[in-house]
């Protein structure tokens, strides 16, 4: 077990190294870089230096004059050896500080929609499986597939039109209203809540379908097995058959899948946050990326890679724990 | 479409007879074949197509036939584990198909089933004690304070030990698992047990143990079995009466002695000629059947067996033979005996 663990961790480190390298290369290879943008801006001001002179000077300031490989190892040394991820070029504050500022909004959105997803998708999946090929099954499946197939910006627009524009129940964009600072703490809470309803609805709608189909498939597999027939033959009530015998066995693959999505809570929802202008991590990272902010983008993307690697590592270990053949030893 | 199919096969309603524990009359189980986007029903697989038989209390009826002939479906339909299409089943004078869900649940402990595959018929996440005892508690068959002793005694009578209770099914061998399945069925104190090929998944030596266990238990508790198998030697060992099935229908029924001594139906003759004899000098006179079993979705006209029968004549191709009693309850469906 320890040997397995050490090997897996070493492998993860190698993967992380190459992921960082690829991300860095892509950031450097973007058609317009951050410094070029600033150089162009400054050169257009009257009486200044020319574009090339500005570019040379800025490249020096931002340590971009030493070539791609040197730049990468410089970043690697600073970030992993010294633990300094530098200042964000766009936001002008340390990368980690900006990250801490925005991550909890994304986490809240993600966590609430994940809970809603579980609460809605799993019972629907069980229902669809119990009534396989019935009208209920087809209705649930069609709505699930609509959720999977249509993009989030479609639903976001539709929800904004319905709930904000027509009904005026919830706020369409942003995280807080104009008069946020003048509200009582309770009022502030409801203000943010009102802004979060539509993004959460969007995130939930687009994610329900997959989990519902997944639950249905696994449930069907279990429902067609002999031991469910045994349970029915015993004369157990239908609810006992479903809850005690069938669902308990469906739970394991579902936990695996849901466990795999947990790191995603820190990744933010880039498109949805953008659509609702919520300053979460997805929105912030997107803004940083399109302007070519290398320190922030590197931190965000390598952070996601690390989370994914940790997630797979944990699920690999859990598999070994859950597997009865290992458990017996 | 199903109703139209069934109109052609009107059956005489059965008179419940106290002599028999189980009476099955004209049982049909059709599975719809759905095709296309709108799942239009384009036909039916006639898995069981008009099966009638009776079993006396305390006796064992062996149901034999080749793979896919509908033996298992008969067993499951009798217990209402598979929806029936038509027919009647009387258990102890009560009609099973007339019962609603609640009454059926009350009825279930009296009629149990042991499945073929002991590896998949036990819930993998429940300890053995719970698998055996769950329904006992559910139906309140024994008082709470005697529950543990009851489960232990049932397990002992099936050759299991009390300390097996807390173990999980994957910790047992195939034979032990089948013992668990039997204990599970017996714990409900049933009168009737469908044994759906209970030994086909086991080694020959274990098969003997399980068969003997089943026979001992039958003697001890006065059980009635419907023993489904394709292994004729096993059926000969355990059965009192035998039914031979071909493509969803019973072609011959009778006592074990009659059927083994004088098989009448050409299919039974062919089937029984294939029983291996443990004697190297014995010359087997095997009757080889041509072709393979036709599709139950589109069975042949007339006698279903006519495509493979060596005695087939013109009448067999158009007319379905009626059951004919050849004396001593030996019933055969064949035009050869229609004179």
Image: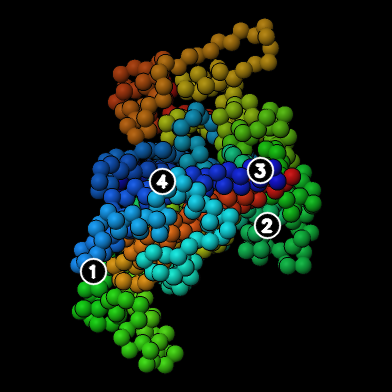
Alpha carbon of mark 4 to alpha carbon of mark 1: how far? 47 Å
Identify the residue at horizontal 61%, vertical 41% (top origin): B119
Residue B130's disc is: 2
Give the position of the N terminus of chain A as an image quadrant.
top right
Label 1 is found on which chain of the structure? A
Judging by the rendered image, the residue that carries numbered circle 1 is: A158
Callout 3: helix, strand or loop? helix
C-alpha distance separating marks 3 and 1: 50 Å
Label 4 or label 1, whichever comes before in sequence order: 4
Q: What element carries label 4?
A: loop
- Separation of marks 2 and 4 at Cα, in angstroms: 69 Å
| Residue A4 circle label | 3
**Residue B271 disc label:** none
Label 4, on which residue?
A67
Q: Nearer the viewer, mark 4 or mark 1?
A: 4
**Where is residue A274 shown, x and y percent of the image?**
31, 66
How far apart are the two marked residues, 1 and 2, measured between alpha carbons? 51 Å
The verdict on a common chain for dots 1 and 2 is: no
Q: Which of marks 3 and 1 is nearer the N terminus?
A: 3
Answer with left or right where residue B230 lies relative to residue A93: right
Q: What element carries label 2?
A: helix
Q: Residues within 10 Å of mark 1 (few under 14, many from 20)?
A: some
């Amino acid at each position: 077990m320890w040997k397995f663990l050490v090997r897996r961790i070493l492998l993860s480190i190698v993967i992380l190294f190459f992921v960082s390298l690829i991300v860095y290369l892509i950031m450097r290879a973007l058609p317009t870089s951050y410094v070029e943008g600033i150089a162009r801006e400054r050169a257009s001001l009257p009486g200044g230096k020319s574009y090339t002179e500005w570019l040379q000077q800025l490249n020096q300031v931002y340590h971009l004059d030493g070539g791609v490989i040197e730049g990468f190892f410089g970043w690697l040394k600073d970030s992993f050896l010294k633990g300094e991820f530098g200042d964000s070029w766009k936001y002008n504050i340390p990368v980690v500080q900006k990250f801490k500022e925005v991550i909890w909004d994304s986490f809240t959105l993600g966590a609430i929609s994940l809970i809603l997803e579980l609460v809605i998708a799993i019972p629907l999946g069980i229902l669809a499986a119990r009534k396989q090929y019935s009208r209920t099954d087809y209705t649930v499946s069609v709505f699930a597939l609509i959720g999977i197939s249509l993009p989030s910006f479609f639903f976001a627009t539709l929800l904004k039109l319905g709930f904000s524009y027509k009904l005026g129940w919830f706020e369409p964009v942003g995280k807080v209203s104009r008069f946020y600072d003048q509200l009582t703490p309770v009022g502030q809470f409801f203000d943010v809540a009102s802004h979060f309803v539509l993004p959460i609805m969007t995130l939930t709608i687009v994610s329900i379908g997959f989990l519902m189909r997944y639950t249905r498939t696994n449930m069907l597999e279990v429902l067609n097995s002999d031991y469910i027939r045994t349970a029915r033959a015993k004369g157990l009530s239908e609810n006992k058959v479903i809850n005690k015998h069938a669902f308990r066995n469906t739970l394991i693959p579902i936990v695996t899948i849901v466990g795999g999505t947990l790191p995603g809570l820190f990744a933010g929802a880039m498109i949805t946050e953008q659509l609702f202008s919520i300053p979460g991590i997805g929105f912030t990272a997107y803004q940083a990326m399109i302007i070519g902010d290398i320190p922030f983008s590197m931190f965000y993307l390598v952070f996601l890679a690390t989370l994914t690697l940790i997630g797979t590592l944990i699920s690999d270990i859990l598999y070994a724990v859950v597997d009865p053949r290992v458990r017996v030893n | 479409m199903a109703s139209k199919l069934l109109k052609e096969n009107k059956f005489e309603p059965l008179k419940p007879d106290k002599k028999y524990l189980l009476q099955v009359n004209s049982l049909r189980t059709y599975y719809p074949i759905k095709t296309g986007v709108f799942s239009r029903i384009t036909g039916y697989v006639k898995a069981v197509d008009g099966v009638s038989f009776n079993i006396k209390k305390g006796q064992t009826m062996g149901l034999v036939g080749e793979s896919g002939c509908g033996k298992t479906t008969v067993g499951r339909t009798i217990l209402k584990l598979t929806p029936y299409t038509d027919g009647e089943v009387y258990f102890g004078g009560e009609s099973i198909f007339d019962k609603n869900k609640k009454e059926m649940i009350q009825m279930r402990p009296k009629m149990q089933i042991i499945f073929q595959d002991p590896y998949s018929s036990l819930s993998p996440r429940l300890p053995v004690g719970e698998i055996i005892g769950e329904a006992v508690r559910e139906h309140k068959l024994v008082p709470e304070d005697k529950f543990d002793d009851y489960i232990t005694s049932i397990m002992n009578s099936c050759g299991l030990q009390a300390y097996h209770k807390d173990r999980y099914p994957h910790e047992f061998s195939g034979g032990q698992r089948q013992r668990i399945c039997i204990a599970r069925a017996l714990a409900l104190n049933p009168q009737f047990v469908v044994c759906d090929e209970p030994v086909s998944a086991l080694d020959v030596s274990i098969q003997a143990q399980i068969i003997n266990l089943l026979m001992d238990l039958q003697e001890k508790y006065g059980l009635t079995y419907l023993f489904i198998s394709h292994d004729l030697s096993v059926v000969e060992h355990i059965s009192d009466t035998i039914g031979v099935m071909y493509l969803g229908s019973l072609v011959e029924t009778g006592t074990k002695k009659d059927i083994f001594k004088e098989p009448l139906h050409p299919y039974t003759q062919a089937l029984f000629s294939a029983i291996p004899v443990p004697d190297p000098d014995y010359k087997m006179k095997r009757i080889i059947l041509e072709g393979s079993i036709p599709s139950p979705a589109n069975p042949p006209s007339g006698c279903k067996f006519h495509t493979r029968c060596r005695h087939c004549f013109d009448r067999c191709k158009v007319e379905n033979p009626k059951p004919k009693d050849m004396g001593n309850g030996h019933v055969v469906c064949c035009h050869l005996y229609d004179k």
